[in-house]
Image: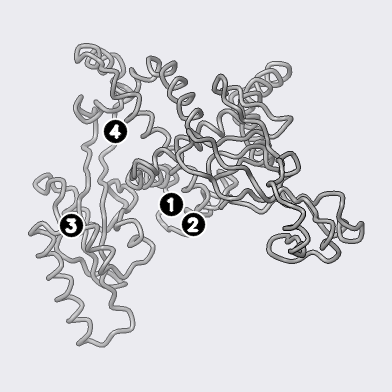
Amino acid sequence: MFRRFVIIVATTLPMAMAADVHVVEEIAAKVNGDIITSAELQDQHKEVEQMLRSQGYTGARLTDSVKQYSANALRDQIDQLLLVHKGKDLNLDVASDVNKELADLQVQSKITDPDKFHEYVRQQTGMDFADYKDRLTKQFLAQRVIGQEVGYRINIPEPELRKYYDAHQNEFVRKEQAFLSQLLISTEGKTPAQVAAAEKKAKDLVTRARKGEKFSDMVHQYSDDPETARNGGVLPPYQRGMMPKNMEDVVFDKNNAKGYVTDPFKVAQGFVILRIDERYAAGLASFEEVRPEIEDALRRPLMEPKIRTYLTQLRQEAFLEIKDGYTDTGAAPGKDTRWKDVAELKPQTTTKEEVAAHDRPHKKLLGIPIPGTRKKPVVTNQATPAAPAAAPSTPPTAQPSK
């Protein structure tokens, strides 16, 4: 089902009824089982303008640059949706990438309280935290598909990778920090006997984790902290001085390698178990640590023409309709993406006898019969013709559109 109800009622509705109907949003394009609205394109226009202003663009230079970006706005939105759909078809999981990105942002903000950090994200981005996280997820999905379907074919020789590393070492200097996951066994409101039972439970879970049981699965099943339990217990990265000393001494102990699971720590809420997911020493990161970043940097300019070819292929395979007045600058040659209104479709063949034998039913708007339409049905753009045979699947019925 498409994501929004976009209601445009034909002029055959009585005037009194038409006055009560409002356009929520106008659909600009349909992409498989999703839509792109004019409001989304307008939001993208505003974001681009704000970004360019922050980079010092003014006057005619700003106007020309915004115009250039806006000309490709629909293309970019379609590109991302096609890549996101492909990523879901491939069952790609980018949760760890999203969590790391959010963790890095939280470290930069120096805000450890989750609620205050969510408010910080809203102030910085103009979006609720959930919406911002959803946007990051789509971006990482698109990047992963490009890397997996296009980038893997481009191999960078080892000498070129090391040459880039030597020339950009200032970009790979890091502060000492640790990436952690936690499992909390709560003792809030419990009796002394229950507290003792909670401590025993925490110690038993440590034993199981050290024997090889998957820590993130244990977090989902046993952790009493709902905020971190949803993402496998992942915490923002910590630098020295950001956590209690007894925890810090264990987490930053060089003898405790990646994957180490700590003994339970007693905290105000109960007993917390920490797992060291990654730890970086202060100073220059090693070549092996940053190798993926270097490969991405060197592949990117080589991939651009191949990416456009791949996106054209995805367009050929997709169900895609573009509303009149909107232009996809990345359109696939020969692909029919014209908007198909119900009124333009040929009716099914029937006989006079069939018409006489059956009374015409009420037309329905979003499932509600419309009075006065028994003999004169109203066209509300609620049907979309079947997708071409090349499409991966027949799309669901479109919502009414303008």
Residue at the location (42% across, 58% down)?
113
The CA span between labels 3 and 2 is 31 Å
Sooner in the amino-acid sequence: mark 3 or mark 2: 2
Indicate the secondary structure of the residue bearing disc 3: loop
Residue at the location (48% across, 36% down)?
391
Tell me if mark 4 has few (under 14), some (14-19) or many (20+) residues whose alpha carbon lies within 10 angstroms of its own: few
Q: Which residue is mark 1?
A: 111
Residue at the location (54% across, 45% down)?
395
The CA span between labels 4 and 2 is 26 Å
Vertical comparison of 99 with 142: above or below: below
Q: Which residue is mark 4?
A: 174
Kindly check if marks 4 and 2 are in contact, taking CB atoms under 8 A apart as contact.
no
Q: Nearer the viewer, residue 150 or 290?
A: 150
Q: Which mark is residue 214?
A: 3
Q: Which residue is mark 2?
A: 116
Residue at the location (11% across, 49% down)?
256
Sooner in the amino-acid sequence: mark 1 or mark 2: 1
Please, what is the three-letter code of the amino acid marked with disc 2? Lys
The CA span between labels 3 and 4 is 29 Å
Q: Nearer the viewer, residue 64 or 83?
A: 83
Please, what is the three-letter code of the amino acid marked with disc 3? Lys
Q: Is residue 15 left or right of residue 253?
A: right
Kindly check if marks 4 and 1 are in contact, taking CB atoms under 8 A apart as contact.
no
Q: Is residue 282 left or right of residue 32?
A: left
Please, what is the three-letter code of the amino acid marked with disc 4? Arg
Kindly check if marks 3 and 2 are in contact, taking CB atoms under 8 A apart as contact.
no
- The colour scheme is one colour
- Residue 229 in sight: yes
